[in-house]
Image (cartoon, rainbow, N blue to C red):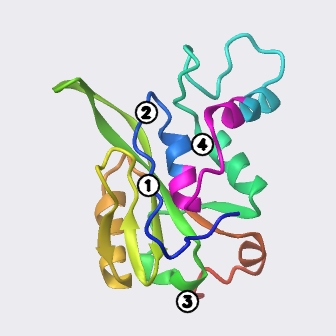
Amino acid sequence: MCEPDGQGLYHEKQRLELCAVHALNNLLQCRAFGKEDLDEICGRLSPGTVLNPHRSLLGTGNYDVNILMAALVSQGLAPIWWDKRRSLDALVLSQVYGFILNIPSNVTLAFVTLPIRRRHWIAVREVNGHYYNLDSKLKSPARIGGSEELRVFLEGQIAEDVCELLLVVKQEVEESKAWLRLE
């Protein structure tokens, strides 16, 4: 598992349908995974299939949540689906490694935005005391701010019916449930 080096933020930009690769690497703050790594996980999860159900038919990416979850587990991390009915105040942010969101995103070809929306993976991570939106479609990381600004950002995202939120914690934190403030 990588860690920020203090020299700046690691930020991969969108290529093909590889937002899952970029979200993982941006979360981990290094190039931990490539397309070939996620394709290998696809093969392990659905061996012997001609059309793998965990990625696009063309093999250009568009990986599903099962692939992200398996990749995170391979790094000693535990992905946890966030129940959107629960208040984000229940999170113990100091115990959360980062966040991966699945959000709707417009499709663009060259300079034209099409009237089509697809699903897109993004990472949010705290680095040097500030949270950042590390969306691969951004030109550079977008600073969110501190814990209160993060909660506002996440609340805005999950208010959309089609947004899903994965908490990412270290496996020992998941086992102890230290990421959750018991009410």
Please indicate whether residue 107 sits to the left or right of residue 75 in the image: left
Give residue 19's position: percent from left, percent from top.
Answer: 47, 40
Q: Residue 15 carries which label?
A: 2
Which comes before the other along the chain, label 4 or label 1?
Answer: 1
Q: Where is mark 4, residue-wise?
A: 65
Farthest-out residue, left: 112
Whole-Å distance between the Cαs marked 3 and 2?
Answer: 42 Å
Nearest-to-viewer mark from 2 and 4: 2
Q: In this view, does 69 lie to the left or right of 61?
A: right
- Residue drawn at (69%, 29%), measured in percent from left and top? 39
The answer to whether residue 73 is above or below residue 119 is below
Where are the magenta residues, as a range? 24-39
Question: Disc 4 vs disc 1: which is toward the camera?
Answer: 1
Three-letter amino acid code at the position of disc 4: Val
- Look at discs 1 and 3 and give the one toward the viewer: 1
Does residue 85 show up?
Answer: yes
Asked whether 35 falls inside the magenta stretch, the response is yes
Q: Quadrant of the C terminus?
A: bottom right
Q: Residue visible at 35% across and 49% down?
A: 161
Label 3: how many Cα within 10 Å (few below 14, some 14–19, many 20+): few
